[in-house]
Amino acid sequence: MNYYSTNRQAPLASLEEAVVKGLAGDKGLYMPERIPSLDAGTISHLKEKSFHEIACLVAQAFFGEDMEPAVLDRIVRDTLSFETPVVQVHDNIYSLELFHGPTLAFKDVGARFMARLLGYFIQKEGIKEVNVLVATSGDTGSAVANGFLGVPGIHVYVLYPKGKVSPIQECQFTTLGQNITALEIDGTFDDCQALVKSAFMDNELNQRMKLTSANSINIARFLPQSFYYFNAYAQLDRIGKADKLVISVPSGNFGNITAGLFAYWMGLPVKHFIAANNRNDVFLEYLHTGIYQPRPSVQTIANAMDVGAPSNFARIIDLFSRRGNPYTEIGKQISGARFTDEEIAEIIKRTYTKTGYLLDPHGACGYQALVDYPLASDETGLFLETAHPAKFKDTIDAILGKEIEIPPTLKSFMKGEKQRVALSHDFNGFKQYLMAQ
Ligand SMILES: *Cc1c(COP(=O)(O)O)cnc(C)c1O
């Protein structure tokens, strides 16, 4: 299968080119030429299959033409070493827990899949080394660093703003060593992102080393996220709750919800989607006005969604243009919601007191968006719980007025020795550092 750019200026790319390059030459995002579909018979039998089998079915539909089935099966198996259980919170509201992976956030799925797929292409083509540059405000860096750890032929540089990521998150990418280098930048997250962008545009640097990115612009990172939507459907179907499914996705760069929309276009029966935002609500504004107006992000307690210009918006527009006027079509299938920090804190506290279920600040937006939708009694609401609450321990402790437990996986990161290279936010210093490696 070939991939085209959402800007339609760059030439078509093979899967391999799309994965190695990340962004198309015209700065557009790659889209598959066709969206394969699973027929109703296949969908109705999902409930008899394991997560691995379901993921292979979906992976095969997208990548099957370009890879041996056994290779793809291996990559899927290595990616999904953990479950994504659906848990009832109360009544007809369910949580899809995506935090049982190594760094306790949903990004583990995409990061692990991309690392293995890229690793496979590097080996196949005999490419000497690919350098992955990733700017992070916390969660992306830890998932990418852990996903790519020890993959031959890939070196990862994680750029993070000094003093602005939580201590637990910092440990998750500074203690690994091997092919992972943490760069502590004296600046903000925007500075880190600007350094990465400048690096991709610098001719001298790109002649010296092969550079790519590992955020959700990369097809290999965002598409595999559709696996768990199918798996969630299978779990709900087993208990007779898969009809009239409304799915709420806490959204920042909109990679996760785009993967859900792809699942829907492939034939997954989803009645409606909700994009839940914090105060960074440019998508909600688009739904109201039809005008997409990116703006600088504001800081919130759901910080993985502090995005003012969601990169996958272009993919959503492209997808729905296939049906007609994108604004009208998007409005039929997706609603929006927005929550302030005060509201998020209130939701976490109230839900915990009433049900015993502990939401993280991102999942809290997803949960409340279903309640407010409002969900009808014959519908099933599913929100994506995108991270373990312990990743935001200080925030949650302050909201609940007590100390929450840290799971052993997180504790083990905190034992390692932190290693990082301190750099200023000046591009020349960063470039000289990379050139010297
Ligand atoms: C990255 C992230 C999000 C936002 O996901 P997008 O794919 O960028 O929309 C939501 N919650 C958590 C915990 C995250 O780490």
Image: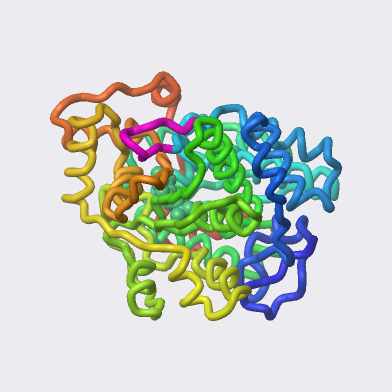
| Image position, residue 317 (x, y; %) | 54, 72
- The number of numbered badges drawn on the structure is 0
Q: Is 218 situated above or below 169?
A: below
| Image position, residue 85 (x, y; %) | 49, 30
Please tell me which residue is depicted at 62% across the width and 57% down the height of the picture: 218
Q: Residue furthest front?
A: 378
Magenta highlight: main SS: strand
Q: Is 397 situated above or below 247?
A: above
Query: Is residue 87 shown in magenta?
Result: yes
Q: How is the image coloured?
A: rainbow
Please tell me which residue is depicted at 83% across the width and 35% down the height of the picture: 70
Highlighted range, magenta? 85-95
Question: In this view of the protein, which residue sits in the foreground, 83 or 48?
Answer: 48
Question: In this view of the protein, which residue sits in the foreground, 193 or 44?
Answer: 44
In-image side of 320 versus 74 (left or right): left
Residue 34, image quadrant: bottom right
In-image side of 110 versus 358 (left or right): right
Q: Image quadrant for the N terminus? A: bottom right
| Image position, residue 4 (x, y; %) | 71, 70
| Image position, residue 47 (x, y; %) | 62, 33
Q: Is residue 342 visible?
A: yes
Q: Residue furthest left?
A: 401
Please tell me which residue is depicted at 28% across the width and 59% down the height of the picture: 338
Question: In this view of the protein, which residue sits in the foreground, 21 or 381?
Answer: 381
Residue 228, image quadrant: top right
Query: Is residue 108 shown in magenta?
Result: no
Please tell me which residue is depicted at 66% across the width and 65% down the height of the picture: 31
Q: Is residue 145 visible?
A: no
